[in-house]
Every structure is written in C-alpha cells, then in structure tokens.
Amino acid sequence: MSQAPSGAGHANGVLIELFLDMMAAERGASPNTLDAYRRDLVDVAARLSSRNLEAATTPDLEHVLASMAADGLAASTAARRLSAIKRFYRFLLSDGVREDNPATPLRAPKQGRPLPKILTEDDVDRLFDAASGLSGPAGLRTRALMELLYAGGLRVTELVSLPLGAFVRAERCIQITGKGGRERLVPLTEAALEAVAAYKVVREAHLPVDRTKSGKAARYLFPSRTAKTGHLTRERFAQILSELTLAAGLDPAKVSPHVLRHAFATHLLARGADLRSVQILLGHADVSTTQIYTHVLDERLKSLVQSAHPLARRTDDDQLD
C-alpha cells in the first residue's frame, strides 16, 4: 500500500468526526452505530488511490467497490459501506464542503437471498417414525401436531391456535386464517386425519383441570392447561419438536417448525406440484415469495450433478483435448 499524501489522513479524520458528531446530535445514532460508520469510512478512505475522501470522484468510489469485491468482502458488508459513504457525502454537500455527491450514481452489489433450510424426505420419515413410537395423550398430540404441520405446511402460530371448529367439509380440509387475515382451505392427508381423530379421543387430558378455567382452552384443537392464550404455545411446541428431533437422531439446530414448512413446499415441488398451487397452500400473498423454493431445488439439482454425474468425477487427466 502506497504512502498516503501528506495531510490527507488528518483531513479525512476531521471530516469523519464532524459527520459522526452530526449523526449523534441530529440522528441520535448510538455509539455502536457511530463506531460502525467510522470503520466503514476509514476503510473506504484507505482504498482510495488519493486517500482523500473530500476530493473523491465517482470513478474513484467505483474502484473502491471493485476492490471490496476483489478482496472477497460479503455483498452485505459492501452494501453497508456504500450506504455509509452516501450518507457521508450528503453531509458534505449539505455543509457546503462539496458541490456534488459522487456516491449518488453507485448501486449496491446484489445480495443473494438466503436459501431456506430444508429436510430431506428421509429426515421427515425419521421424525414421523419417532413420533409413532410415542404413547399416551402426549404422544397422540405430538403425532397430530406433526401430521398437520407437515401435511398442511402450516405456520407454527396457525398450527397451535387452530380452533376446534377449523375442520370443514366432512373434516377433509381445515380452514386457516393466516397473515393479514387471509383465509385458505388446506386439504389433509389420510394420515393426518387419522392422527387427529386418534388425538381427539384423548384431547380432554390437555384441558385445564379446573373446569371454570377451561372455557377459553375448550375452543382450541390443542388446548393448554397453563397458557393464558388457552392454546399450546409456540415455545412449547418448539420444545416438543426438539425432543422429537433428538429421538429421531437428527440435529435439533437444523429442525424447526418453519423448516418443516419449508420441507412441505420443497417436497411438493420436487414431486411435480405447480408453483401457484403451492403458493395457495402456503398462504403466500405473492408468488415471488414461493419462488424461493424453486431456487432450493435448483441448488439440490446442481449438487446432484456435481456429486453423482459420471463426468463430474473425471479428473483433469481424463479430460479430452
């Protein structure tokens, strides 16, 4: 790295501190936020060939973004630093230090959307095998919970707060009220219907012992003896799922109610379901939300080709000229 021009570092430091003073006084930025801004701006200054923030041009800043990419900085980190320099140059512009904002034309690097965690069909089978080995009212409830969660791709809140009267059309479907009050009908598998029927026989075991307090709980398919809501809580179900995951020999860190919802969608698409149908079943307002599962399948297919295709195992020496 070349030597910084005389005075550039001091000038940068003065401008950065003035900017941080403004952020603290006018925007109420926290000490941690101010430290982050300082680190980002110092890094940008160090990447400038002139080391001079005040005199930087748009091409200079484009070079800075390119150097970040070359160094392997995460797109999210580069985007944060771009946000910092845009705000910094807006401050210099408003204070009359500069007559333009060289960061205005710059665009943040595209950040890939994180792919959801998924379980294989074998993993799901292991969970259900573990659930089938449970007995008593608690075991029957766990089986019913799991069947409904996976058979319907429900959100955990939708599952635990299911009203007793949610079953419609001869109990072949359940009516779900999801995000934004949107309602949808979710068809159930025979296994789910059988598990719920078996659970209903022992459902009263989960009602409050004091009948005077059971009014609210009696409205729910999965009542709770202690929860103020009257129904099984999200936290309690997460605990039940964690215990089941351990019994199935899986890693609890990789299994959650939402991961099972992801598995439901991914497995349907893998077996030929169309995107619009899966969108309706999941209760997504926009099909673009559902499309993330097609990306999951794309990644799985790429992995399959790379690991299982005969040509993928050929070494460089085997390649044809």
Image: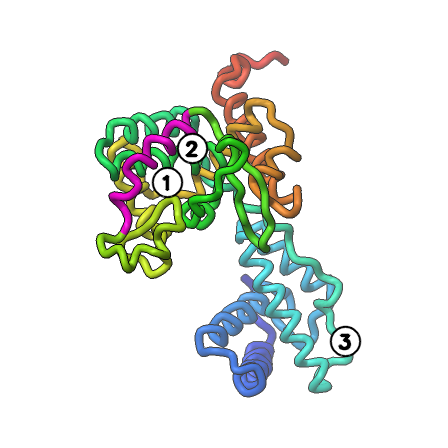
> Circle 1 — which element?
helix
Cα separation, mark 2 vs mark 1, equals 8 Å
Quarter of the image with the N terminus is: bottom right
Does the image show residue 10? no
Mark 2, other Cα within 10 Å: few <14 / some 14–19 / many ≥20: some
Q: Residue at x 73, y 65 (%)?
A: 58
Residue where numbered disc 1 is placed: 254
> In the image, is 190 to the left or to the right of 176?
left
Does the image show residue 96? yes
Q: Residue at x 67, y 77 (%)?
A: 54
Residue where numbered disc 3 is placed: 100
Q: Earlier in the sequence, mark 2 or mark 3?
A: 3
Looking at the rendered structure, which numbered label has been put on residue 119?
Answer: 2
> Circle 2 — which element?
loop
Quarter of the image with the C terminus is: top right
* Residue 95: percent from left, percent from top: 69, 86
| Residue 94 position (above or below residue 258) | below
Cα separation, mark 2 vs mark 3, equals 52 Å
Q: Are marks 2 and 1 in contact (CB under 8 Å)?
A: yes
